[in-house]
Amino acid sequence: LGAGIHGLAAGNDLVNAQVHKHISQAFTGADGHNTQRLFRLSDLGLAEFDNVLVVLDNGRWNNYNFEKLFIASGDELNESVVQRTRKIFYVCCTRTKENLAVYYHNPSDRVLAKAREWFGEECVIPIS
């Protein structure tokens, strides 16, 4: 996990510029060229990429819940929304060959704890 899972204030141009700089550095190829391209999941098929940035945002989606992905337990794990969210997250994460960065806007302490469990303490990096 190259970048981190941590919050950032929406609409804050200074923070967004810092995030862009951090991501640009992480996703610059060995030849010095920026390798960023944006895709919708539906456009990917089985394509793989050297570097992948996954942005987790619940927004107004009713079919996915990224917070529940991290904090669901017991019977919640069998809910259809959790199963759909788990599948889409799996597909996104398995598109990478080299570097995976996951960004989660304003995660709760429980989400951060689970992220540290899944990805390791050293891989959950605050972006500030």
Image (tube, grey):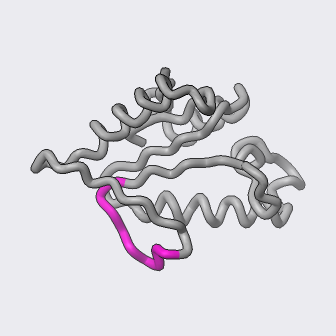
Q: Position of residue 101 (x, y in %)?
A: 44, 45
Which residue ends up furthest to the left in the rendered image?
31
Query: Above or below — where is 117 with respect to 88?
Result: above
Query: Is 72 included in the stretch rendered in magenta?
Result: no
In the displayed structure image, the side of residue 89 where residue 124 appears, left or right: left
Q: Residue at x 60, y 39 (%)?
A: 104
| Magenta stretch encompasses residue 44 | yes
Residue lying at 48% horizontally and 34% vertically, measured from the top left: 4
Q: Quadrant of residue 20?
A: top left
Whether 39 is drawn above or below 7: the answer is: below
- Residue 77 at x, y percent in the picture: 80, 56
Q: Is residue 60 visible?
A: yes
Q: Which residues are magenta?
A: 43-51
Query: Residue 26 placed where, x, y %?
Result: 30, 40
- Residue 63 placement, left or right of 94: right
Query: At which x and y percent is residue 30?
Result: 13, 48
At 73% across and 49% down in the image, what residue appears?
59
Left or right for 41, reference 33: right
**Which residue is at a point 29% across and 58% down the rendered structure image?**
50
Foreground: 95 or 116? 95
Residue 64 located left or right of residue 96: right
Residue 69 in view, yes or no:
no
- Is 94 placed above or below 67 here? below
